[in-house]
Amino acid sequence: MKPTIKTSRRDFILTGSLGAGALLLGSALSSLAAQEPDKKLGIALVGLGGYSSGQLAPALQHTKNCYLAGIVTGTPAKAEDWSKKYNIPQKNIYNYKNFDEIANNKDIDIVYVVLPVAMHKEYTIRAARAGKHVICEKPMALNANDCREMIAACKDANKLLSIGYRLHFEPHNQEVMRLGQKQIFGKVTKIDTGNGFTYNGDPNAWRLKKALSGGGALMDMGVYSIQGSRYTLGQEPIAVKATQEKTRPDFFKEVDETIFWELKFPGGAKVTGKSSYNNDWSYLHVEAEKGKFALEPAFGYSGLDGTINGKPMNVPNNIQQAAQMDDFANCVTLNKQSRVPGEEGLKDMKVVDAIYRSLDSGKWEEIV
């Protein structure tokens, strides 16, 4: 089916009242009720771009186990604005030169890295060495080898590392995980998924610079499609073959525009996926032996919708980032592994690396 959703990445914003949405945090938070920590943990956001300002900071106003304690920015005007808006004391405001001094700040327990992809490894490692637990935004790093270095650094520092996979805490996607992994309708036989938006923004934005982004729509949007296939099946793919098209080569000079791929899984399901900076896609369609289920939109920040055998899924939307950050704060308090640890980010980047190799070779590539 050809999706008709017209949703850009910038339009993936909270559409309802945050106050009302806070009542719908769903199962991801309900399980924490009996374990709610006595003390809220402090989170420092590193990088104050659109995702931090539009999603993470507002979500932190509705968290139970953590709060916005500090910020790291290279822009003094942003520091002043955020300090006033969120009542952040000057001692909890850092820039990229004095970032390592965060080690001496007891107000900050968790550092959330929300920077261009090329900076993820450096600031994840520096945060861990400063004695802070880390959430790193997706995609985790430029490649799988960088992911391995980040995981090792956090383990060496005895600090937890989690990747910003908010959809593992979102009720619609959780239901897809349940239906697929538990084979509620029998073995999954087919998955088709796509994620993308029509990019008409700044041609000089970091997302269009390969050195900063590592790639284009595949890195930015395709990770969701890869994740969707993986968590629907509860399996890891073993090989991939990919093709691409570029209709605006002057605009997407350094990065990919649209990529199509097929993944081989051990169970034999036919799995196709795609990502784009020139198409408005957000869907996950699944066929099993005895039924079908789907999400469309599937991957946005809010307004997700799903069907099971053509009937409404009837699960709530929630504040995904609040659920995600609360869960990690709870993991830190209880010293237990996150459901989306660094290893989860590594698994996706192994697939991404193989897709890029396939584009170069024109052949099936093993995922190793």
Image: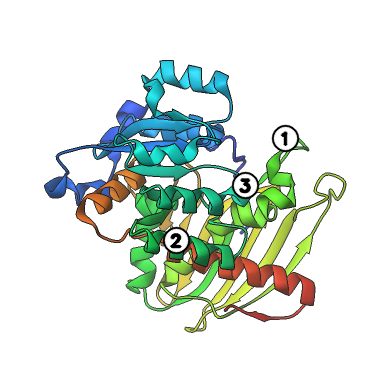
Dot 2 or dot 1: first in sequence order is: 2
The residue at 55%/51% (across/down) is 122
Q: Amino acid at mark 1?
A: Gly
Rendering coords of residue 20 (x, y %): 31, 29
Which quadrant of the view contains residue 111? top left
The residue indicated by pointer 1 is 201
Question: SS of the residue at dot 1?
Answer: loop
Q: Quarter holding the C terminus?
A: bottom right
Q: Quadrant of residue 186?
A: bottom left
First reached walking from the N terminus: tag 1 or tag 3: 3
Q: Position of residue 326 (x, y in %)?
A: 29, 44
Q: Nearer the viewer, residue 337 or 274?
A: 337
Helix, strand or loop for disc 2? helix
Q: CA distance from mark 3 to mark 2?
A: 43 Å
The reply to whether the C-beta atoms of the residues labelled 2 and 1 are less than 8 Å apart is no
Q: Nearer the viewer, mark 3 or mark 2?
A: 2
Q: Which residue is mark 2?
A: 153
Vertical arrangement, residue 147 with respect to residue 295, above or below:
below
Q: CA distance from mark 2 to mark 1?
A: 35 Å
Q: Residue at x 56, y 21 (%)?
A: 76
The image's mark for residue 4 is 3
Confirm whether residue 2 shows in the render. no
Residue 250 visible at all: yes
Q: Which mark is residue 300?
A: none
Q: Nearer the observer, disc 1 or disc 3?
A: 1
- The three-letter amino acid code for the residue at tag 2 is Ala
Q: Quadrant of the N terminus?
A: bottom right
Q: Work out whether 92 lies above or below 248.
A: above
Residue at x 52% of width, y 59% of height = 284
Q: CA distance from mark 1 to mark 3?
A: 21 Å
**Quick one: SS at disc 3?**
loop
